Amino acid sequence: MKITDILTFGKPMLSMEVFPPKTQDAYSKIESAVNEIAALEPSFMSVTYGAGGGTSEFTASIARDIQKNHGVTALAHLSCISSDKDDIIAQINHLKKYGIENILALRGDLPAGASYDEKRELCYAYQLVQIIKENGDFCVGGACYPEAHPESENYRSDIAHLKHKVDAGCDFLTTQMFFDNDILYNFLYRAREAGIAVPIIAGIMPVTNAKQIKRIVSISGNTLPPKFLRIVDRYGDDPAAMKQAGIAFACEQIIDLYANGINAVHLYTMNSPDVAAKIKSNISEIIK
């Protein structure tokens, strides 16, 4: 099933993201976590793609197994920054062979030590979107950033680039994590005002340990609202309490989104079945 069809159901939905192992040795452990998350019957599951395409085969095989073994629609991530067009087409055909109908098109991150070069054959996500659309009947998603992409000059230019990506063929968008729902609501207003009419799925990251905060801020520069910071200050040194508080904060965000008419929420699970299960249980009556 295509993601766009799922998004037309008109009721609150909860999808979940998992990531593949970096090496074959870790495959069975990751596979077990993925299977537990799939057993929660999310609306769909996305499978990430490592920097430089290092996990491409694992991404494809996990996406295939999610659909084949659990009957859950899979969304395979695909990035282009370290690939040429022929390699991308080969990856697309591979996903097609596995029965994958949905691809999240990303520019992607360069491998460690590599430098960005605009002379590369593929430098931007919109180019990848075009190639996917030309090489199969896929539902194509794209990423968006409620607080603007870290490399954008300002909000206006970020929205302009996003519009370009949508015009290239994106069927839906999924947001980067955010911790203040008002930031998302303001972003949605700007996006709609710019003529971006495709569905936008809200991405939520449950922060269950204090170490995650430093990594989140260093990578994406997210705004952390005072309410969230107070939680970290109070419970950051108590792992069990921080986990419980982080789950509660994520649930509160999700409930507020649903209450304000944002029916599509995507949970960045970090391959933690227990966290994903607790969140789904806490909102079970809302999404039934």
Image (cartoon, rainbow, N blue to C red):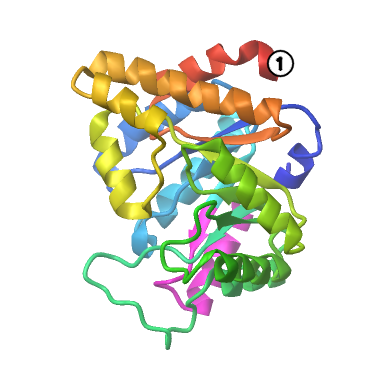
Q: Count up the numbered dots.
A: 1
Q: Is residue 162 visible?
A: yes
**Which residue is nearer to you in this view: 210 or 276?**
210
Residue situated furthest left in the rendering: 237
13 is higher (above) or lower (below) than 220: above
Q: Is residue 139 visible?
A: no
Q: Is residue 24 magenta?
A: no
**Which residue is nearer to you in this view: 224 or 166?**
224
205 is higher (above) or lower (below) than 24: above
- Residue shown at 52% from the left, 73% from the top: 124
Mark 1 residue element: loop
Rendering coords of residue 83 (x, y %): 43, 73
Work out which quarter of the rendered image holds the N terminus and state it.
top right
Residue type, label 1: Lys
Work out which quarter of the rendered image holds the C terminus and state it.
top right
**Which residue is nearer to you in this view: 174 or 75?**
174
Rendering coords of residue 22 (x, y %): 30, 48
* Residue segment shown in magenta: 77-100
Residue situated furthest front in the rendering: 226
Q: Is residue 82 magenta?
A: yes
- The answer to whether residue 96 is left or right of residue 137 is left
**Which residue is nearer to you in this view: 116 or 75?**
116
The residue under label 1 is: 288
Rendering coords of residue 151 (x, y %): 42, 68
Residue situated furthest bottom in the rendering: 119
Q: Picture quarter containing residue 233?
A: top left
Rendering coords of residue 251 (x, y %): 52, 22
How crowded pointer 1 is (Cα within 10 Å; few <14, some 14-19, many 20+) is rated as few
